Image (cartoon, grey):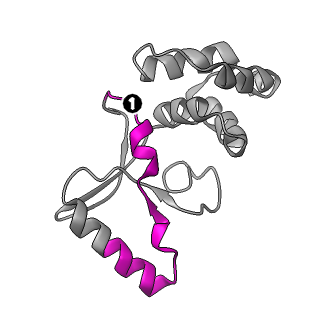
Amino acid sequence: MVLAHHAREATMDLDAAIRRHHGPVLAEARVVAEELGLPLWWLNEQATSYLPAGQDVQATVVLERPGLTVLAASPRHLLALKVRAARQSDVADIVVLARLVGATSAVQAERIAEDVFAGEPLSERSRAVLADLNDALRSS
């Protein structure tokens, strides 16, 4: 939300899915945390288990160095993740992401989430969050 989409000014952590060289990446993340006074959990892998099976072909490269490529999830994938999580802290992000992908209703946002997650239906909680946002989405 911050790095690639400029939707907020700050975040508490950086969600990451480390594909290769897991140990060295985490070791370097600890060095960065110590140097910058960040919490050790600033590079957060907890969301990895919630990622869709399919690849995000619209992901954006935000940093590329020899041996390191950092991708930011597309607005479409982020919307699907936020809708499925349906946390109160995600509500503002859902509205921003819906606008970025052109979704103007709860039904459209729901279809995007189900498409990204290969037809897995949304929870009642996710549907309720979207229904509550219908007015905000329509005023996009």
Tell me, yes or no, whether the highlighted magenta stretch contains residue 40: yes
Rendered location of residue 118, percent (x, y): 39, 17
Rendered location of residue 83, percent (x, y): 60, 30
Tell me, yes or no, whether the highlighted magenta stretch contains residue 122: no
Q: Looking at the image, is 140 positioned above or below residue 28?
A: above
Per the image, label 1 sits on a secondary structure element best described as loop
Residue type, numbered disc 1: Pro
Q: Nearer the viewer, residue 88 or 62?
A: 88
Q: Looking at the image, is 76 positioned above or below residue 31?
A: above
Residue at 47% over, 67% down: 41
Q: Residues within 10 Å of mark 1 (few under 14, many from 20)?
A: some
Q: Nearer the viewer, residue 120 or 97?
A: 120
Q: Looking at the image, is 82 positioned above or below residue 135?
A: below
Q: Quadrant of residue 131?
A: top right
Q: Looking at the image, is 116 positioned above or below residue 73?
A: above
Residue at 54% over, 48% down: 5
Q: Which residue is mark 1?
A: 52
Is most of the magenta stretch helix, strand or loop? helix
Rendered location of residue 115, percent (x, y): 45, 17
Q: Quadrant of residue 101?
A: top right
Q: Is residue 62 left or right of residue 1?
A: left
Q: Is residue 50 left or right of residue 2?
A: left
Rendered location of residue 135, percent (x, y): 82, 23
Chain part drawn in magenta: 28-54
Residue at 37% over, 76% down: 30
Q: Is residue 120 left or right of residue 71?
A: right
